[in-house]
Amino acid sequence: MLEKTSKLDMKYLCRTCNTKCDNIPEHIIKVHKFSKSLVESQLKAKKDCYDSSFEIIE
Ligand SMILES: [Zn+2]
């Protein structure tokens, strides 16, 4: 059965590129070529700063 992902793993749909991911910072860094340090500092300043760009999916 499909039990690969634990319940702790949230899934997100990126509104920008319409791609699913389970790690927002990683997605932004890998797919949208943001620098890791920029993403980390933005998340530090505002933990949910990317939430509006992603939709939570099951
Ligand atoms: Zn994206």
Image (cartoon, grey):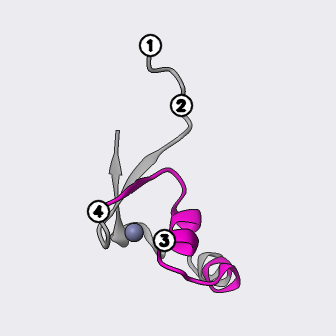
**40 relative position to 19: left or right:** right
Disc number at residue 31?
3
Residue underneath mark 2? 5
Residue type marked 3 = Val
Quarter where residue 52 is shown: bottom left
Residue type marked 1 = Met
Residue at (35, 71) in percent of width and height: 53
Residue underneath mark 1? 1
Residue at (40, 53) in percent of width and height: 12
**Mark in the foreground, 2 or 3:** 3
Label 3 CA crowd tier, 10 Å (few <14, some 14–19, many 20+) = few
**Mark in the foreground, 1 or 2:** 1
Residue type marked 4 = Asn
Q: Would the CB of label 3 be found within 8 Å of ligand 1?
A: yes
Cα distance between the residues tagged 4 and 2:
20 Å
Indicate the secondary structure of the residue bearing disc 3: helix
Q: Are marks 2 and 3 in contact (CB under 8 Å)?
A: no
Indicate the secondary structure of the residue bearing disc 4: loop
In the rendered image, the quadrant that contains the C terminus is top left
The magenta segment: 18-40
Residue at (29, 62) in percent of width and height: 18
Q: Along the polypeptide, which appears first: circle 2 or circle 3?
A: 2
Disc number at residue 18?
4
Residue 25's spot in the image, x, y percent? 57, 67
Q: Is residue 38 visible?
A: yes
Label 2 CA crowd tier, 10 Å (few <14, some 14–19, many 20+) = few
Indicate the secondary structure of the residue bearing disc 2: loop
Q: Are marks 1 and 4 in contact (CB under 8 Å)?
A: no
Label 1 CA crowd tier, 10 Å (few <14, some 14–19, many 20+) = few
Residue type marked 2 = Thr
Cα distance between the residues tagged 4 and 3:
11 Å
